[in-house]
Image (cartoon, coloured by chain):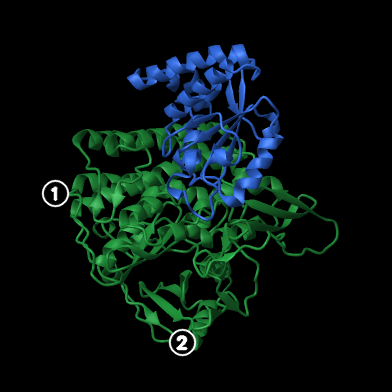
Chain colours: A blue, B green
Amino acid sequence: MRRFLLEGLTRRPLTESPPAADDAMREELGRALVDVSRQKLGRSLAIRQVDAGSCNGCELEIHALSNPFYDLERFGLHFVASPRHADVLMVTGPVTRNMAEALRRTYDATPAPKFVVAVGDCAKDGGCFAGSYAVTGGVGSVVPVDLHIPGCPPDPTALLKGLLALLEEASARPGAT
Amino acid sequence: MTKLPKLAWTRPREFRAAPFPVSSVTRSGWSSIAKALGEGQVTLLSLWGEPKAVCMALHDAQAHRVAVARLVLSKGDFPSVGRHHAPAQRLERTAADLFGLTVDDAPDTRPWLDHGRWEMAHPLGTAAPHSDATPYRFLPVEGESLHQVPVGPVHAGIIEPGHFRFTAQGETVVRLEERLGYVHKGIDRLMLGATLDRGAQLAGRTSGDSTVAYAMAFAQAAEAALGTEVPPRAFWLRGVMAELERLANHLGDIGAICNDAAFAMMLAQTSVLREKVLRAAATAFGHRFMRDRIVPGGVTTDLNRDGEARIRVLIEEIGERFPLLVDLYDNTASLLDRTVATGRVGPELVKRFGAGGYVGRASSRDFDVRRDLRYSPYDMLNLEVPLREDGDVNARVWIRIREVEKSCALISQLLSLMPQGDILAPVHPAGSPVEGLGLVEGFRGDILVWLSLEADNSIRRCHMRDPSWFQWPLLEAAVEGNIIADFPLCNKSFNCSYSGHDL
């Protein structure tokens, strides 16, 4: 283990390594996030993820936000275990009828001000599952949605872009903060 | 020993290239199969309903052959298989939920996927208006100083929804009962009448982490039913995609298991490798998860020189980096203290349930579809299947570690031997109704797809069975006698799919 710890001290962080265009954009996005969230949400934004029937693809990419390449926490964004600690609900899936009540209750348990981000194509309107007897047809049919991040699944960069857009919207809305 | 009825046993070479010969059985024949399953003569691959019939897929492990039995129902009821063979119970309950079939003499008559909230009851049979949701009856527990801990469907982490009902005595779990079905999207019904393209799209969205494996199993079933000649290069590209998917999932999960034992450093390290696999996949095939790349007839994306080079660099990098992580795992006593002897599943249970993947192979079940029911491109490759006997969390981690190494070796073989040529062949309708079977080794285990097509290639019935069907029940057994705090560790070491199971 010592080897890894020492390596961590001596090696350049992965987050700053190869400056491809993609990474530069991510860095830029990151800085903007810091500015807005400090101003409006006291340096941090707590996110609670709710899977309301996704195929698990979106979850995998949301997980990836925490890996050393994206390192979500450096922006003051972090995932929390309870809706009671959350500012943002990040909801995936077409919202199955079997999950609708759980989603509604999770929303009710989240303190205001709160924002809902629907993630993935099926979270918008049911996507390829629309019309099924078992889905309600999108997050918006169960709880109010502030932002939708499209993609099947959206990659981590798209997710990060979406969170930024949310912060801008939040700051423009009177009374939301 | 119960005598099995006459069945058309079929070897992989036959069922992978031609429509599947279904064996019609009588009620007594059906019951004999159920008893033979209970005696362990054959292994259950799946059980599914049809509007006026019920089917079972069986595997004869010694002879490497498969059979599908169909019992045509005149009154909508069939003799319970779960009565003799517990692994069939949840599948039977599902057939009852979806088709309104009655299971005679069933040991468990509670609904399974149907929570009473769908637009209708029996959506694939004679759809009926739904009565109000009735509370689910969990199994009764009796005894002194027992308490219950209900968990879910919304969990604390970024994971799929499901409900776990723990009954504990002090800290020790005496029973775990799972309740699933929360992510049921009604895929079986969406498949009805769909085109093959739409079917492939839905199959690839059944379990997001196995999108390649599902698309491949679906394509296999369609190609077998229609006798499609798939170009060799397409098979090899499918192999590369399937092994990249396996690598990404194993790498992510090895770290995540350690993270559930509070060893976050491993997750940080393996998630770097996982991200590199996904980026290489995006470069090579245009999508991080390689979704919608496999379709009936072949693949939609060819591998160019850049993509191939990127994958070779990736394999080299994993080859350098991964052994250090294996050392780290093997030399961290506090971590091994959590994983060794935790969540043990015995070989007899694994065999009885026919549990595939690392869950089976960590408990002596020597089965891998790639080797035992061969399909292209694995029939032309050198494949070793790692096996262990200890059956605990540690064993499942080691199976995954070994599979990472094997997948890297396979990808190198695939890249160096890949033939040139077309990647997609036209898929012609058969002109009459046909049926085909697809069986693929996903990272989690064997995925089965049964496909019935109409004369014009539209889908009459598509049944997909995730490996999790036979692994979820074993998680209940693995947790028994462990402390609740070790449940996340056990659960992650299984990493069963919710979406693949709930469909």
Residue A152 seen in this snapshot: yes
Assess whether mark 1 and mark 2 are in contact (beta carbons under 8 angstroms): no
Position of residue B171 measured from the top left corner of the image (x, y, whole percent): 76, 49
Subunit ID for the residue under disc 1: B
* Amino acid type, mark 2: Thr
Q: Is residue A12 left or right of residue B338?
A: left
Res. B421 mark: 1
- Tag 1's secondary structure? loop
Q: Residues within 10 Å of mark 2 (few under 14, many from 20)?
A: some
Give the chain letter at badge 2. B
Mark closer to the chain start, 2 or 1:
2
Up/down of B441 relative to B435, above or below: above
The picture places residue A44, in percent across and down from the top left corner, at 61, 19
Q: Which mark is residue B366?
A: none
Q: Is residue B370 above or below residue B261?
A: below
**Residue shown at 46%/34% (left/top)?**
B271
Q: Which residue is mark 2?
A: B26
Q: Quadrant of residue B214?
A: bottom left
Front residue of B442 and A99: A99
Q: How many marks?
A: 2
Tell me which residue sits at (49%, 22%) in the image.
Answer: A165
